[in-house]
């Protein structure tokens, strides 16, 4: 019986390709220009948000719109710990604390709200973004009397490596989680929560912990992103785009396969950057068309299209063979 | 020895008592049947026993320990598993992983994925699942989905299994196979508590039967006694 989920077969070759790719990526700053490094840092940031979103929402079917909240908390932690007047902690520590802060908030919020299902959960998580935004806004106005915060700037290469490190951690976690028994449990919850509960799965715990785990990566990325923004206020840190883009990127790439969201995030972020710089007037318009086309014609995303092409080619190939014999 | 006991088990939905003051006990090793007209409260009683609902008032004990109030996953890990009236399988997950999930999470100590997968394969054979085990459960026939559910329940090392209308919707041949399966489950040493509408099946395999009507217990006894009970006949056929 072949149950590939738990077998190590098939890890080796993709693993090696991944490693080579990773080494190339990690040494990138030594042979390319500054702009490309910055662009790839952006792509990695979106990659982290997308994969961390898929980690929880993909198998569970709970549509979370909280990415911006977790990313924003990370940005704020980064801004507080790394002000332009001199950093309070080393960079890496700020990144870890940003991740932990988001993870803790997700733990609390998850414990309270993961009993909500469907649309209620989606709306609540979106409300969370607004809630944290407004609380911080109030705090900055009435308590700290700061309109915004200046963040120390960090060398582009350093920022790239940090983001790459978080990205690799996110992707590896995603990969191993999906193959683990907890990945199966979360999938079971997504397909029939009641049956999962009656089959011995502690559904609340699995949901809350995975939700928190996914938030850690978004928060860590936020702390790095703060140094990229250099000036932040609550509206910048908790921009709703960071809730919706990860979802769109995951759909664009296709969630059927593990690499779908990765490809989706990479292409989507690249497209966004390119369109924004080259067609600033109509980029949103073009973007809109791309999205509509994706949802209408490629329900399984880019991965679905690729699989369809491969199937067609194979079938065509075998048909020719049959004709020969 | 009693494996499951209920005292004055009651559940209200709004002002309506779906289950009302029901006392029952299931002996270890027997096949215990639960029948009653539609809306009698049979599935509600199963939901109370398996932890989906909490009886109020009333107490349910499993192996001598009070379980009413415990979460379903805890009750499952104690050794009680169930199937559902409307099959609930993990549709996008291969049949064998549906079952393996029960072994990984439903057993008292948990099980490693590889051991669970092996166990799942054996259990699928046991329940008579004869199509490739890697087919996603959503694409199976009703009979095979029911087999997957039973195997998943058994995978949790259940000592007591609650079968909610196992035979409903099956063909005559499949019903006969299901009756045989119930016998073989009992032969493994697993106590069976089953809701059933197919009279031939319930009369054929049960040691004792309890009858619910409007949430109340109206009769209990051997299949012969139940078949002869005037009260039961009235309920089913009208006066």
Image: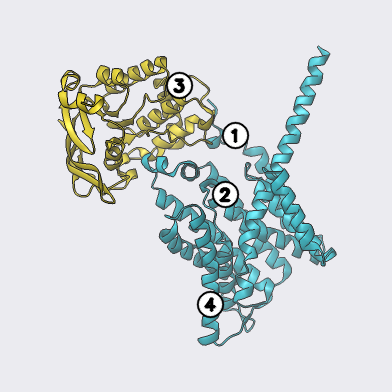
Chain colours: A cyan, B yellow
Q: Residue furthest top?
A: A325
Marks 1 and 2: same chain? yes
Residue B79 spot, x, y in % from top left: 29, 36
Q: Toward the viewer: B41 or A119?
A: B41
Q: Are marks 1 and 3 in contact (CB under 8 Å)?
A: no
| Disc 1 chain ID | A
Q: Do circles 1 and 4 both sit on a common chain? A: yes
| A53 or B91: nearer the viewer | B91
Q: Which residue does the numbered mark 2 point to in the structure image?
A: A174
Find disc 3 in the rendering and name its residue.
B129
Q: Secondary structure at mark 1?
A: loop
Alpha carbon distance from label 3 to label 2: 33 Å
Q: Quadrant of the C terminus of chain A?
A: top right
Tell me the chain of label 4.
A
Mark earlier in primary sequence (1, 4):
1
Disc 3 chain ID: B
Name the spot of residue A213 as percent of width and height, x first. Answer: 51, 56
B236 sits to left or right of B148: left
Q: Which mark is residue A9?
A: 1
Q: Are marks 4 and 2 in contact (CB under 8 Å)?
A: no
Q: Residue at x 40, y 43 (%)?
A: A194
Q: CA distance from mark 1 to mark 4?
A: 49 Å
């Amino acid at each position: 019986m072949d149950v590939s989920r738990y077998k190590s077969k098939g890890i080796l070759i993709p693993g090696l390709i991944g490693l080579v790719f990773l080494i190339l990526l990690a040494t990138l700053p030594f042979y390319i220009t500054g702009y490309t490094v910055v662009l790839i840092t952006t792509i990695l940031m979106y990659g982290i948000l997308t994969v961390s979103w898929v980690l929880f929402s993909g198998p569970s079917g709970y549509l979370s719109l909280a990415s911006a909240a977790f990313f924003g908390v990370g940005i704020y932690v980064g801004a507080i710990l790394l002000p332009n007047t001199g950093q309070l902690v080393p960079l890496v520590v700020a990144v870890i604390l940003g991740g932990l802060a988001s993870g803790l908030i997700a733990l609390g919020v998850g414990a309270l709200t993961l009993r909500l299902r469907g649309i209620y959960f989606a709306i609540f998580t979106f409300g969370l973004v607004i809630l944290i935004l407004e609380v911080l806004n109030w705090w900055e106005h009435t308590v700290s009397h700061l309109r915004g915060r200046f963040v120390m700037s960090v060398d582009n290469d350093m920022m790239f490596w940090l983001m790459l490190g978080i990205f690799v951690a996110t992707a590896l976690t995603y990969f191993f989680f999906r193959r683990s028994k907890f990945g199966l449990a979360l999938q079971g919850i997504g397909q029939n929560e009641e049956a999962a509960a009656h089959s011995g799965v502690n559904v609340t715990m699995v949901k809350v912990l995975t939700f928190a785990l996914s938030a850690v990566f978004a928060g860590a990325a936020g702390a790095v992103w703060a140094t990229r923004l250099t000036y932040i206020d609550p509206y910048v840190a908790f921009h709703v785009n960071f809730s919706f883009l990860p979802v769109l990127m995951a759909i664009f790439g296709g969630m059927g396969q593990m690499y779908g969201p990765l490809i989706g995030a990479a292409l989507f972020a690249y497209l966004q950057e390119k369109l924004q710089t080259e067609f600033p007037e109509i980029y949103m318009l073009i973007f809109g068309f791309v999205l509509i086309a994706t949802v209408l014609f490629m329900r399984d995303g880019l991965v679905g299209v690729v699989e369809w092409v491969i199937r067609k080619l194979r079938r065509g190939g075998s048909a020719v063979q049959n004709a020969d014999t | 020895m009693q494996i499951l006991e209920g005292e004055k088990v009651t559940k209200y939905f709004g002002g309506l008592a779906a289950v009302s003051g029901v006392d029952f006990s299931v002996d270890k090793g027997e096949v215990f049947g639960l029948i009653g007209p539609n809306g009698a409260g049979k599935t509600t009683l199963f939901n109370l026993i398996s932890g989906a609902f909490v009886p109020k008032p009333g107490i349910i004990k499993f192996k001598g320990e009070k379980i009413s109030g415990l979460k379903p996953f805890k009750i499952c890990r104690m050794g009680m598993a169930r199937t559902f009236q409307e099959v609930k399988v993990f549709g996008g997950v291969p049949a064998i992983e549906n079952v393996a999930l029960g072994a990984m999470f439903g057993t008292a100590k948990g099980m490693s994925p590889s051991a669970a997968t092996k166990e799942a394969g054996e259990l699928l054979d046991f329940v008579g699942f004869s199509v490739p085990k890697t087919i996603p459960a959503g694409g199976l026939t009703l009979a095979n989905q029911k087999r997957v559910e039973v195997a998943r329940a058994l995978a949790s090392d259940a000592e007591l299994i609650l079968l909610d209308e196992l035979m409903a919707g099956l063909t005559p041949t499949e019903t006969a196979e299901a009756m045989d399966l119930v016998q073989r489950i009992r032969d493994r040493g697993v106590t069976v508590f089953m809701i059933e509408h197919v009279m031939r099946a319930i009369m054929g395999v049960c040691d004792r039967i309890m009858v619910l009507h409007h949430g109340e217990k109206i009769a209990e006894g051997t299949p012969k006694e139940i078949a002869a009970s005037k009260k039961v006949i009235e309920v089913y056929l009208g006066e």
